[in-house]
Image (cartoon, rainbow, N blue to C red):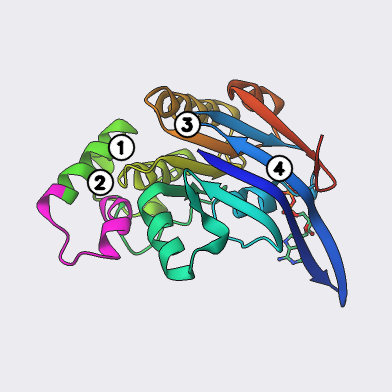
Amino acid sequence: MLSAQNISKNFITDNKVVPVLKNVSVDIHDGEFVSIVGRSGSGKTTLLNVLSTLVRPDGGELHYGTENLSALSEKRLNRLRQSDFSVIFQFHHLLPYLTVLENTLLPFMQSVRPVKKAAMEKALGCLERVGLADKADRLPGNLSGGEQQRVAIARALVKSSKVLFADEPTGSLDKGTGEKIMGLLSELNNDGLAVVMVTHDPVYAKMAGRSVHIEDGVIV
Ligand SMILES: Nc1ncnc2c1ncn2[C@@H]1O[C@H](COP(=O)(O)OP(=O)(O)OP(=O)(O)O)[C@@H](O)[C@H]1O
């Protein structure tokens, strides 16, 4: 489904080029659940960002199905990202002045105004799926951390994406809440959504079908 070949990525720090990903190759198969693990600073987030096309690599190629993403213009990449990819982060990036329902509808708000009734129904269905239909009219500030993360997942679901990229989705949550989020991700994966997740937690990493271990920018 997604194939990264010989990816390299450098950052400039103190006027020096620092290689962060060094010739990394990894394949993500249709409907797979893959965790990316490794020490702090090893390059996990950078790899996830390259796979989700948020960051362009300096070298190597990224293919999605038959499409060579490395050759796509930013415009076409953006369109593909909007239709097929979803990203959730440790700190869920909800807009504080929009309600739970409006935050869930954000992917539609970018392209269609006013939001159609069908989109509204779909968003409510997604909130139901993550157990938050009764809180659709609340503002994020009035939700717990776990609930906010569930809104972020509902927002990812509303697009019917093919791949969900999650960067430490349980990182800011207590153990019980983190387990619920992991349960939800596993459920979605069982329904066919591919999940690529960065995590520090070895227990959560094992919930994925496969773990990719990265050390100092190299897959080991
Ligand atoms: N935008 C940037 N500019 C300069 N250096 C960066 C940038 N982003 C990341 N780095 C550096 O690249 C290395 C890898 O960062 P990355 O965030 O990918 O690691 P990580 O394994 O996800 O770490 P953590 O588990 O602590 O989040 C680190 O040394 C980091 O300081």
Question: Residue 30 got which mark?
Answer: 3
Residue for point 47% across, 43% down: 65
Residue 173 located left or right of residue 5: left
What residue is shown with label 4?
Answer: 25
Mark 4–mark 1 contact, CB under 8 Å?
no
Residue for point 68% across, 53% down: 46
Q: Earlier in the sequence, mark 4 or mark 1?
A: 4
Q: Earlier in the sequence, mark 3 or mark 1?
A: 3
The Cα atoms of the two marked residues, 3 and 1, are separated by 28 Å
Residue 189 located left or right of residue 33: left
What are the residue bounds of the magenta stretch? 101-118
Residue nearest the observer in this picture, 160 or 202:
160
The Cα atoms of the two marked residues, 2 and 3, are separated by 32 Å
Answer yes or no: is residue 196 visible: yes
What residue is shown with label 2?
Answer: 136
Q: Earlier in the sequence, mark 4 or mark 2?
A: 4
Mark 1–mark 2 contact, CB under 8 Å?
yes
Answer yes or no: is residue 39 visible: no
Badge 3 crowding class, 10 Å Cα cut-off, few under 14, some 14 to 19, many 20 or more, is some
Badge 4 crowding class, 10 Å Cα cut-off, few under 14, some 14 to 19, many 20 or more, is some
Within the displayed image, which quadrant is ligand 1 positioned in?
bottom right
Badge 2 crowding class, 10 Å Cα cut-off, few under 14, some 14 to 19, many 20 or more, is some
Give amino acid for label 4.
Ser
Q: Is residue 107 above or below residue 202?
A: below
Q: Earlier in the sequence, mark 3 or mark 4?
A: 4
The Cα atoms of the two marked residues, 3 and 4, are separated by 17 Å
Mark 3–mark 4 contact, CB under 8 Å?
no
